[in-house]
Amino acid sequence: MNKKNGVMDLTVGRPITQLLLFSIPLVLGTLFQQLYSFIDTIMVGRLIGTDALAAVGATYSLHFLILGFVQGACVGFGIPLAQAIGGNDATEFKRYFWNGTWLCIIMAIVMTIVTLLGSDWLLRLIQTPDNIFSDASLYIRVLFIGIPASILYNFSSSALRAAGDSKHPFYFLLFSSFLNIALDYICIVPLHLGVAGAALATVISQLVSGILNLYWLSAKTEFLTGSREERMLSGAHVKHLCVVGFPMGFEYSVSAIGAVVMQSAINVLGSVAVAGQTAGEKIRQMFTLPMESVGMGMATYTGQNDGAKRPDRIRQGIKAGLTIQWTYCVFAWLVIFFGKRGFTSLVLGSTESPEALLSIQYLTIISALFCIHGALMIFRNTLQGMGYSLHAVLSGVGELVGRSIGGVIAISGAGFIAICYSNPLAWGLALLYCAAMVTYFIRKKYGTR
């Protein structure tokens, strides 16, 4: 297969160098993505109010539950594409891309209808406080209406990354990030759309980024040119995409169920706890999303090398990935240690309010345990890149258990400090399973080579 237009062949070259070069655009992309999410949080908290910030935060677990499934499934759909690239099979890449497109269209229709019908029921289920329920309902409904835009963005960027092109998804995401910031201000200040405006800005930005990804795939690469037969629905290809993609989506959702349980516990603690955890969690995400980006790079790297039958490079890639992640974790901890009050003040406008003190406590504890999350991203995405997505779902059970334990302990008397330890506990349980499974499947599939 002729690789050009920014496409990288990850089956050759020094693993740590290739993984870094491929992952840097992903890291920068998620940093900008999280930056506009962070600015969105600042705008909501400072321009609309603390209750509006709490309303947005109260929807996070539901957003994670539904749109996390979309992200996971689309990343999974990219694994057979990456394996086709590694196996130097352009025809298979095209067949998987088009069958993935048909699956995405069906998924968009079904998920949009179901989530809109069930949104208020879900908010009641997690005991969203009455004083923020109206804004929470409005915010999550707009995001659910935008599910087709989210699917378009996630699948198109996943297809580009699978082909070895991580640069152009970053360029388009960078553009949409600035667009989102501008739309946030326009929708919230001049148009007075409140939390609905913040959600609408996110949906429009994702739609634009997805269209740009799709344009680049169709106009600037050779991957989508082909015969009518290559664009037709294929039962075998659909089945394989479902086997790989849907378990990855369910893995995100199973993990998110634990987040829903934890969010329910936070809601029981009151709107002050919701606002404090929301501020701290938004700041935390800004620092941990780069680790998840390296993980996505690891999935593509593993997929290509698995397609090329190179277990030696998969093992080397794991070591390189852990080196990258843990080096970054030290840096992130130092920045948060010295900057947590400043970050919290940006979101809440204070470092001494009850919400701010809870945010600072949350950041202090969770940042010291980032190394667990970094390692999990490497081992989980190695499993996914090798095609063992079902086991990624089982690792999500560990996250479900960890977050559920934290939530139960919190409402049983321990209070907010149990919430601070819930995510690290969830990461640790999932990591134990993923590390064991990666070791087992490499030996089973390739022996001791």
Image (tube, rainbow, N blue to C red):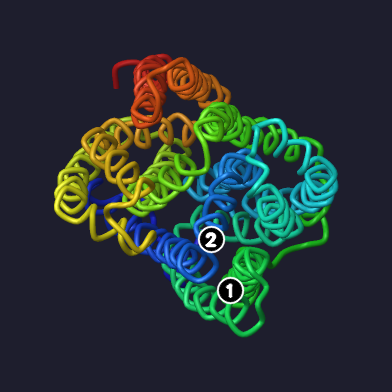
Residue under label 1, please give it: 216
Element class at badge 2: helix
Residue 282 image label: none
Quarter of the image for the C terminus: give it.
top left
**Circle 2: residue type:** Leu
Residue 314 falls in image quadrant: top left
Q: Nearer the viewer, residue 97 or 187?
A: 187
Q: Is residue 411 visible?
A: yes
Element class at badge 1: helix
**x 30%, y 45%: residue:** 357
Residue 292 falls in image quadrant: top left
Query: Which of pointers 2 and 1 lies earlier in the amino acid sequence?
Result: 2
Q: Nearer the viewer, residue 447 or 184?
A: 184
**x 49%, y 17%: residue:** 408
Q: Position of residue 82 (x, y in %)?
A: 51, 47
**Circle 1: residue type:** Trp
Q: Position of residue 186 (x, y in %)?
A: 59, 82
In screen coordinates, is 133 left or right of 388? right
Q: Nearer the viewer, residue 298 or 3?
A: 298
Q: Position of residue 23 (x, y in %)?
A: 34, 55
Instruction: Judge the density around disc 2: few (<14), some (14-19), many (≥20) Cα neighbours within 10 Å.
Output: many
- Where 378 sits versus 182, above or below? above
Q: Position of residue 80 (x, y in %)?
A: 58, 42
In screen coordinates, is 315 left or right of 399? left
Alpha carbons under labels 2 and 1: distance apart = 9 Å
Mark 2 touches mark 1? (CB < 8 Å): yes
Q: Is residue 222 visible?
A: no
In screen coordinates, is 420 left or right of 161? left
**x 28%, y 39%: residue:** 361
- Where 245 sits versus 46, above or below? above
Residue under label 2, please give it: 160
Number of disc labels: 2
